Every structure is written in structure tokens, then in C-alpha cells.
Amino acid sequence: MWFEIALTPFLLASILLIFFDYKDKNKVLLSGVLFAVTILIKQNAALYLFPIFFYFYFKKKLGMFVYFLSTLFLTIGVFLIYLFNIGVFDQFIRWAVILPIT
């Protein structure tokens, strides 16, 4: 489907930023934003959090993983607030959460 193609550049850029320079805080923060966009395109991408966590764990940089997660949640939170402000939050929940479960 088209959304797998749409999420690939964001996911790949996020993982490559972490892989090549996991010690640079700015690149980890940018990676979190890119990963948030990936999750907003398709929620199944959240499964990639496990390999990213283990990568930071084995590199002994869990503090950087916290930066990554904080940026990720902040980006998603801003998007959800935007949806709420324009009045389509309930439709987003219906289409992105409820319907895929049922």
C-alpha cells in the first residue's frame, strides 16, 4: 500500500541518524521527530521502538533514548492537540485507533 512507501524515508532517516551518530543529542532529537512522523503515518511503525531501545541499551546510552522518546511523544502530542483544535480529534481516534482494532 502507499503508506508503507510513505513511511519508509522517515523511518530510514530516523534509524540512520541514530545508527551513525547516537551520541549527538540534536541528531537523536531529530530522529525522534522523524520517528513520530513515521508513527503518525502508520501506527505499526511503533514496533520499531523495540530494536531502537535495544540499540541504545547495548550502547549504554539509555539517557539518549529518553531524549528520543521525549521528542517522539512531544511531536505526537502537538499533532493531537492540533487535531483537537480543528475539531477532528474524534474522527482521528475512530479511524486510526478503533477501526484497526475491530
Image (spheres, rainbow, N blue to C red):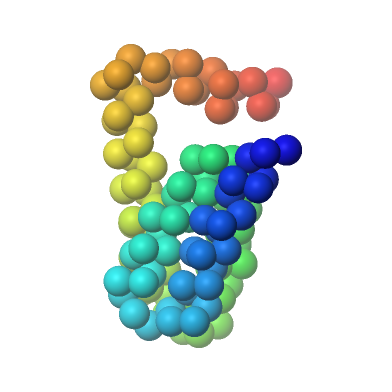
* Relative vertical location of residue 16 with respect to residue 3 in this rendering, above or below: below
**Image-quadrant location for residue 50:** bottom right
* Residue 59 in picture, x, y percent from top left: 50, 84
Can residue 57 be seen here? The reply is no
* Residue 83 in the image, given as x and y percentages of width and height: 35, 25
Quarter of the image for residue 58 reads bottom right
The x and y percentages for residue 85 are 26, 21
Quadrant where the C terminus sits is top right
Q: Viewer-proximal residue, 101 or 81?
A: 81
x 30%, y 39%: residue:
78
Q: Residue at x 38, y 83 (%)?
A: 23
Which residue is painted at 39% across and 55% down in the image? 33
| Name of the residue lying farthest toward the left | 85
For the image, the number of numbered tags is: 0
In this rendering, does residue 25 appear at all? yes
Q: Is residue 16 above or below residue 98?
A: below
Residue 57 as seen in the image, left or right of residue 25: right
Residue 80 percent location from the top left of the image: 36, 32
Query: Relative to residue 82, is residue 17 depicted above or below?
Result: below
Question: In this rendering, would 14 be left or right of 83?
Answer: right
Residue at x 58% of width, y 72% of height: 54
Q: Which part of the image, by quadrant, shows the N terminus?
A: top right
State the residue in front, 57 or 45: 45
State which quadrant residue 61 falls in: bottom left
Relative to 60, is 1 above or below? above
